[in-house]
Each structure stands twice: as structure tokens, then as C-alpha cells.
Image (spheres, grey):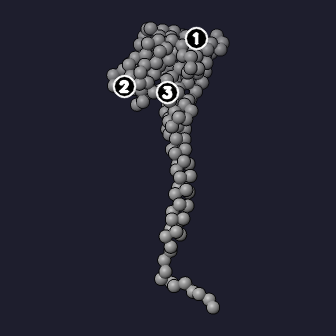
Amino acid sequence: MTTTRNPEAGMTLIEVIIACGLLVTLMAGLMSLGGLAISTTENQGHLAARTTEYAQDKMEQLLALSYGDAVTDTRSFPALNSGGSGLAAGGSSNTSSPVALYVDYLDQDGNLCGTTGAACAAPVGTTPPTNWFYQRVWQVTQVSANLKQITVTATISRGFGGAMRASSTLTVLKSNPF
């Protein structure tokens, strides 16, 4: 004798609880992947792109200087005609050990610290101001009598979600008389 199940009979409560348990377990695993995806997108997509943009901005500002300029202060905007390093050989491309006159800081919106509208005060020497978010350091190297190498590195103060800090480095050559 075979027993047939009533077509109108539903699922038992135990079957529903087991199905819900499996669903919750799978969703918990997928949530951690979602968090990782959000963190990676913010750090490598958004913040890394911004560091590249700000490094390019600084590079363009330095390339606009004349080859022999050794006094223009590019740590302010617009650049001042004295008090800076211009394109004098020096500086460092290491963001952990900035060199005075070869470093500046930006707030989270990209405003130069110490300028109107910035959420951070002007830095003092190599000491970063409070509320800085982006740091730019640059190095000028005299390659030959008529050739200089300029390297700009931009980074952020902290990575999103505890990840590594996004950083971008650009290097160009500038020749005399240009």
C-alpha cells in the first residue's frame, strides 16, 4: 500500500526553520564579501584616483615654474614669489619623512590646508595640521646640467575600513631652457 501526500499539505515548521537557518548562514557569508567589495572600491577606486589627481595638480604647478627657479613657494595657492624651494634640488618622495618646503597638505575636499575654505590650518614645517586628509611630497633631482627629475607622491591619512593607504607617484623630466 502506498501513501500519497495530500497536495494541499504545506511544509512543516521544522522544514521552514531549517531553510531559514541555511539562508541566514549563506547571507552572513555574502555580507562579509560585500563589506570587502565596498572597502576595496573606496580605497582603490575613489581614493587612489583622487591621490593621482592631486599628484598631477602639484606636478603641473611645479612644471609651470622656470627651470632655474629656486624661491617660488608652491605650498600656497596661488604660488608666492619667495619663501619656497621652487625647483631647487632637494625634497623626498617618501611620505613618511617629508622635507620642509617640499610638502603640503589638503583637506578631505581637496582644499589646500591654510587657505580660505579649508577644513585644516596651515602646517608648520613638516608637522601635519589637524584634519588633513591628503599629503603631497615632492623631490627635485638634478640629473645633468640641463635636466631635472621631478617626483611627486600623494597619499591619504588613513585607508577606508582599515585598509592600506592609497598612494600615487608621478615622475617627469624637465629640461633647460623649458
In which quarter of the view is residue 26 placed? Answer: bottom right
Q: Relative to 2, is 97 above or below?
A: above
Residue that lies at the very extreme toward the bottom in this rendered image = 1
**In this figure, which residue is indicated by the disc labeled 2?**
119
Q: Which mark is residue 152?
A: none
**Amino acid of disc 2:** Ala
* N-term mark: 3 or 2: 2
Q: Position of residue 49 (x, y in %)?
A: 51, 35
**In this figure, which residue is indicated by the disc labeled 3?**
157
* N-term mark: 2 or 1: 1
Q: Residue at x 54, y 13 (%)?
A: 99
Using residue 84 as the reference point, say whether residue 3 is left or right of it. right
Q: Nearer the viewer, residue 23 or 57?
A: 23
Q: CA distance from mark 3 to mark 2?
A: 14 Å
**In this figure, which residue is indicated by the disc labeled 1?**
89
Q: Nearer the viewer, residue 172 or 133?
A: 133
Q: Position of residue 62 (x, y in %)?
A: 51, 19
**Amino acid of disc 1:** Ala
**Amino acid of disc 3:** Ser
Q: Position of residue 33 (x, y in %)?
A: 56, 48
Whether residue 57 is visible here, answered yes or no, is no
Q: Quadrant of the C terminus?
A: top right
Q: CA distance from mark 2 to mark 1?
A: 31 Å
- CA neighbours of label 3 inside 10 A, class few (<14), some (14 to 19), many (20+): some
